[in-house]
Amino acid sequence: MAEPRPFRVVDLPGVGPTALLVFAGLYAPIVTLVVYSFNAAPSVATWDGFTFAWYLKAWHNDAVMNAAANSLIIASLAALLSTVLATLAALGTTRRPAFFGITAIYAAINQPLMVPEIVTAVALLIVIAAIKAATGYSGLGYLVVAHTAFCIPFAYLPIRARLEGMDLTLETAAADLYASPWQSFRFVTLPQLTPGILAGWMLAFVTSLDDVVITEFIKSPGQDTLPTYMLGQLRRAMTPDINALSAALLGLTLVLLSGFFLLSRRKS
């Protein structure tokens, strides 16, 4: 007697065409944007040949370069700080027995993921506005702090997942050989944890680089990042160089997310 075939969702009628329609709806606009970023015509209504002119125009635009520099500085620092804090939090919540209040700690760390981003933005605005009024300082440091607070859970998740998947045998063996806790972490835990740390940094970097809501609430005049600059330009008129900027930002994001995916899959 033949064994019954296992149930598979893909065998249901209409699943294939529905999936194709969903993917087409998701990715057709993105593909269209990338294609028209190379359009020689200034309008998306017509195609007038292939060109890199809009990329060159964006490259020689001082406002674009300043916004891009702000984005890279803020994203790099926020990713670094959030990854360090997320690593410490992951070690504190996974390398010890469960204790009373650990659920509340998980909730506190992941709070930016659980509430609408605009709520986090308003809360940060209230605190940072008070600090600005008290100190008179209005530099990029506030954006770095705000992005760091928002990016911590994004870095924490892959680092914690990596720690939970690591075998404790080597750490136990190091302790049996009289290694100090620091030596055990430096020579045993950290090398195994490095792929998770790098993946967390990449995810935090992409999250900070693409952020609009928190940046709009916190930034001072003249502190546009690339996403907020593009949003401001779109309010005036849709120009082809915005397509080029969007395509370039998409390409950078895809590269970093591909690296995150590969590092997350790494076993050793």
Image (cartoon, rainbow, N blue to C red):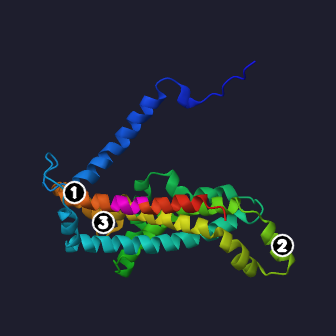
Q: Residues within 10 Å of mark 1 (few under 14, many from 20)?
A: many
Residue that label 2 marks: 173
Rendered location of residue 99, percent (x, y): 75, 60
Indicate whether residue 266 is drawn in magenta.
no
Q: Secondary structure at mark 2?
A: helix
Mark 3–mark 1 Cα distance, whole angstroms, equals: 20 Å
Given residues 194 and 222, the one toward you in this image is: 194
Rendered location of residue 58, percent (x, y): 21, 67
Which portion, as a residue range, is magenta? Answer: 249-254
Instruction: Mark 3 and mark 1 in contact? Answer it, CB < 8 Å.
Output: no
Q: Residue at x 44, y 58 (%)?
A: 120
Given residues 14 and 76, the one toward you in this image is: 14
Residue that label 3 marks: 226
Q: Quadrant of residue 242?
A: bottom left
Instruction: Mark 2 and mark 1 in contact? Answer it, CB < 8 Å.
Output: no
Of labels 3 and 2, earlier in sequence is: 2
- Nearer the observer: mark 3 or 2; the answer is 2
In the image, taking residue 113 as reference, residue 37 lies left or right, namely: left
Residue that label 1 marks: 38
